[in-house]
Amino acid sequence: FESFFGGGGQRRSRGRGSDIRIKLRLTFKEIAQGIEKKIKIKRFVVAPGAQFITCPTCQGQGQVSTVQNTILGHMRSTSVCPHCEGSGKRIGNRPPESGPDGMIKKEETIKVKVPAGVEEGNYMTLNGQGNEDIWKNPGDLIIMFVEGDHEYFVRDGENVLLEVAVSYPTAVLGGKIEIPTVDGKAWLKIPAGIQSGQVLRLKGKGFPRLRSRSNGDQLVKIQVETPTKLSRSAKKLIESLEKDLGPVQKPFSKIDL
């Protein structure tokens, strides 16, 4: 059984073994599509043949009491038993391959089905896949999701951000260019006369929203690439174009801080 949470603290309860926490790194493509992964974990389990006896120090209570004489009279206090650490049991018959607590470390391979759309800070809890206590009650396995870096993309919630450089002729005349997406490629229409800094939107090309059938968008910031090296013929064409276009109509504007 498994449960999925957005972020924050994790569930803890008494009467079971300790939890195991691991990090699972995912690529943007794996996050976009969802994936089933096999992971190896090492967990403590009770060794075969291990036997436990009632702790003679606390008589199985898990706590010890002490009485101190003070000016106010007798003061009684209780604390966790130092010999059984609160379990009320101590190892009796210890198999040779086990540790002092009668436990062995066991390696297991488990399957983890990662839903599409998870993000950094989300975690999944696999109940009963953690370490056992002496009564063989296991804790949980808590898997923290970590996003791997991408060569081009930046994530903003369900949206994907990408910066694209287009040539000056494409910016002036418009056209179509092929760009990467989180799950493949797509064609992006460049409107004629686009300016550097303008953002175009590809609807539904972002990450899936958890517990929803909808997707975020891919936001594409356009940068017009100004050529730095020109041939003589290209330079003459640019000079001719400058005469035809005339001066910039609005050369100054206020910067928004």
Image (cartoon, rainbow, N blue to C red):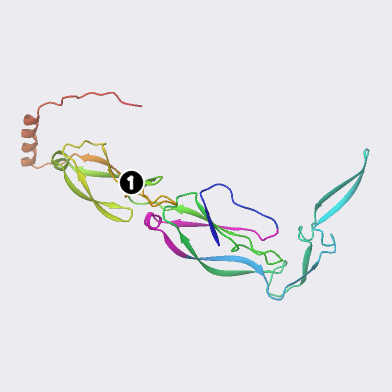
Q: Quadrant of residue 45?
A: bottom right
Q: Is residue 96 above or below residue 151?
A: below
SS label for mark 1: loop
**In the displayed structure image, the side of residue 18 where residue 203 appears, left or right:** left
In the image, what residue occupies the spot 13% across and 40% down? Answer: 173
Which quadrant: the C terminus? top left
**In the displayed structure image, the side of residue 150 where residue 235 appears, left or right:** left
Q: Position of residue 185 (x, y in %)?
A: 26, 54
Q: Position of residue 146 (x, y in %)?
A: 47, 53
Q: Position of residue 216 (x, y in %)?
A: 36, 47
Q: Nearer the viewer, residue 234 or 65?
A: 65
Q: Is residue 12 shown in magenta?
A: no
Magenta stretch bounds: 15-37
In the image, what residue occupies the spot 53% across and 48% down? Answer: 7
Q: Position of residue 220 (x, y in %)?
A: 28, 43
In the image, what residue occupies the spot 60% across and 63% down? Answer: 128
Which residue is under mark 1? Answer: 217
**In the displayed structure image, the side of residue 82 where residue 148 appears, left or right:** left
Which quadrant: the N terminus? bottom right
In the image, what residue occupies the spot 6% across and 29% down? Answer: 243
Q: Nearer the viewer, residue 209 or 176?
A: 209
Q: Quadrant of residue 48?
A: bottom right
Q: Is residue 33 shown in magenta?
A: yes
Amino acid type, residue under disc 1 in the picture: Asp
